[in-house]
Amino acid sequence: MSVCGEAVGAGSLPSELVVHIFSFLAGPDRLRASAACSHWRECLFYPALWPRLRLSLRVSPAERPRLEFLMRKCGWFVRELRVQFAADNYPSGGGGGAAAAVGEGAAATGDGEAPPLCPRWLDLLRTYLELVLCVLSSVRNNRNLQKLSLFGDISILQQHGSISNTYLSKVDPDGKKIKQIQQLFEEILGNSRQLKWLSCGFMLQIVTPTSLSSLSNPIANTMEHLSLLDNHIPGNTTLITAVELERFVSLRSLALDFCDFTAEMARVLADSNHVPLHRLSLLVHSVSIMHKSLDSMPEDENWKALTRNSTNLRVYIMAFDVKSDDMLRILKPSIPLERIHFDSYVTCVSGAVVDLISRQYDKFLTHFILMNDVIDMSGFPDLSDNRNEDPLVLLAWRCTRLSLLAVHGYTVWAHNLIAIARLRGSDLKVLEVTEESIDFDQGELADQDVDPVHNLIEQVSLGLGRPWHAVMDIELLSVFTEPTRHFYREMQSFSEGI
């Protein structure tokens, strides 16, 4: 096609028009369209097209060139940056994964020798530090940044001691990279002018107890979400104190390690000068309880004062390998608990804890997740042992707002599962139970005229008012993921749902 003898085509469109066309396309389609010509490629990274950047990065050297290119183009203007560093293929020296490799090393060093270090893990950690440096250095001078969310999923080694004392000493012997990362993070906070959302989870010492002091008072006063979680800080160190929290008067959502959330913090948040808190996410980890203490946790009167100031407050708790006695201390009656997730590799939840939850939080509870990966050849624990009523059935009966129930690794009797479906009906939007967790009474198995599995599927489907099947593979379970990753993902959606 030609006009007045001049060629007219896609390459001759004005930049403003190309950018407008790109604004209607999804990210992948924009990238494909940008391959049409150099002019369109230049228009691809116009700031208005990339207000948000959400990346899930494999910790691999192959990611670095692409990441550097993308951050060089977008890092200086992006308004929302969410990055997840995911080491999804854990290396090992043998066939059992990194945890197995490190565990075998630890077991083989009974004479006091240091466990051998996996060379591939050293490479992984080295790459991780380089990717983190790339991201932080690209946004250090970005004054448009409003939401910053960082998550580092390399926590598998936490099961076998401190990464910082073993692998980091080999990868970063003089600590220069870690110090540079910490300085860049503080520089980002210090340069920020519009930051409303700051979320940093399990990022391997990126946050220090002094990091938040880099925020100016005007920014701290207007911050709406704060999430600080790190399993690698030493001893009784906390990432934020009650005194520091006093500056954050506009917080609407907060996520912390439970052992860091003290009675004094609850008093600060309950003060009339503080805007009402809407979401509180707390991670209760057996490691934190071991190194810290529950003595400073909020008492019931602290929770009452907090809910008086924050009438719409809802709480999400994830408990990882926490003893039932500790949970009975933690679960105060006045907590407005909406979601709770138990995950275990060592310690199982007792029926008494489930019963307490159903009694105390019947007006609030919507999500209940029970996961157990304890290897026990005698079978899964049965919460209904020595009880007239099954605690899960009572939970479904009492908690009238329950919309999600997921169970793996605990015995769920077929007749109880049918009862749960009938009690909650279509209001129970998600009912996920792994096939291996379901058991049948001898009477059901002895009835030759009825297939117990078919009858279970039929009765639960009728109760829910929709087709239902047991989860055949645990990896198909919607909540099946590494616990810290699941907590961080759920905390994000929980906090964004205000």
Image (cartoon, rainbow, N blue to C red):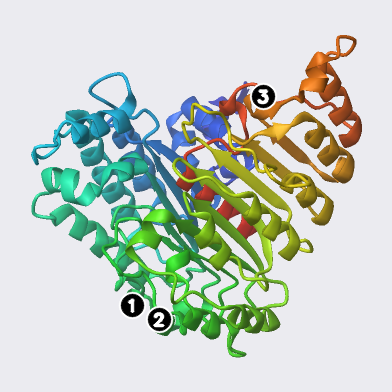
185 with respect to 116 (left or right) = right
**Secondary structure state at the residue bearing disc 2:** helix
Q: Which residue is mark 3?
A: 435
| Rendered image quadrant of residue 457 | top right
Q: Amino acid at mark 2?
A: Glu
Q: Nearer the viewer, mark 1 or mark 3?
A: 3
Residue lying at the far bottom in this picture: please name it.
272
How far apart are labels 1 and 2 at the CA level? Answer: 8 Å
Q: Nearer the viewer, mark 1 or mark 2?
A: 2
Q: Amino acid at mark 3?
A: Glu
Query: Which residue is nearer to you in this view: 376 or 340?
Result: 376
Residue 307 location, x and y as percent? 67, 78
Residue lying at the far top in this picture: please name it.
448
Query: Which residue is nearer to you in this view: 149 or 108?
Result: 108
Q: Label for residue 213?
A: 1
Query: Do the numbered discs 3 and 2 sit on residues whose CB atoms are within 8 Å?
Result: no
**Secondary structure state at the residue bearing disc 1:** helix
Q: Which residue is mark 2?
A: 244
Question: Measuring 77% from the left and 29% from the top, which residue is drawn there?
Answer: 414
Total number of numbered labels? 3
On-image quarter of the N terminus: top right
Decide: few, some or many residues near mark 3? Use Cα within 10 Å; few <14, some 14-19, many ≥20. Answer: some
Query: Do the numbered discs 1 and 2 sit on residues whose CB atoms are within 8 Å?
Result: yes
